[in-house]
Image (cartoon, helix red, strand yellow):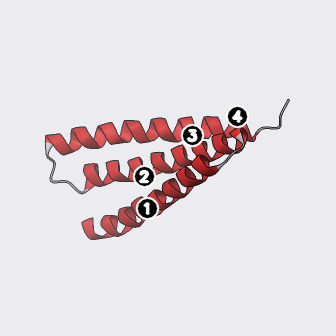
């Protein structure tokens, strides 16, 4: 069972890491403020997903150590916060201009 979870979590971490780096690069290279904000929001979403996967690895694939559970819980909270903040910002900047 641990082997299956490992094969599911590791590609998720790597894919979200790549998307996070791509959106970070695009955000920093963009000259338009609105486009920069959209790419920053997408980067936050990718980081949130990556932190969630890391938290799941810490929570499910650990030996039950208290320190790993605490670190996993912290990553879980940070991931959820980044995910929702990115989704909120993306919805704000993708809406039509008033």
The spot of residue 27 in percent (x, y) is: 60, 48
Residue corresponding to mark 4: 92
Which quadrant of the figure contains the C terminus? top right
Residue corresponding to mark 1: 12
Residue 83 vs residue 63, the one in the foreground: 83
- Give the mark, 4 or 1, whose residue is nearer the N terminus: 1
**Cα gap from disc 4 to disc 3, whole angstroms:** 10 Å
- Give the mark, 4 or 3, whose residue is nearer the N terminus: 3
Label 4, secondary structure: give it. helix
Frontmost of labels 4 and 1 is 4
Which disc, if any, is residue 50? 2
Residue 26 vs residue 52, the one in the foreground: 26
Q: Residues within 10 Å of mark 3 (few under 14, many from 20)?
A: many
Which disc, if any, is residue 86? 3
Residue at x 40% of width, y 59% of height: 13
**Pointers 1 and 2 in contact (C-beta within 8 Å):** yes
| Name of the residue lying farthest toward the right | 98
Q: Residues within 10 Å of mark 1 (few under 14, many from 20)?
A: some
Label 2, secondary structure: give it. helix
Which quadrant of the figure contains the N terminus? bottom left
- Give the mark, 3 or 1, whose residue is nearer the N terminus: 1
- Above-or-below relation of 31 to 77: below
């Amino acid at each position: 069972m641990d082997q299956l979870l490992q094969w599911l979590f590791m590609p998720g971490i790597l894919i979200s890491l790549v998307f996070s780096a791509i959106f970070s690069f695009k955000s920093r290279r963009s000259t338009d403020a609105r486009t920069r904000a959209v790419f920053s929001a997408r980067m936050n979403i990718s980081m949130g997903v990556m932190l969630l996967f890391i938290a799941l690895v810490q929570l499910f694939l650990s030996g039950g150590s208290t320190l790993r559970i605490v670190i996993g819980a912290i990553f879980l909270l940070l991931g959820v916060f980044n995910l929702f903040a990115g989704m909120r910002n993306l919805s704000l900047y993708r809406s039509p201009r008033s």
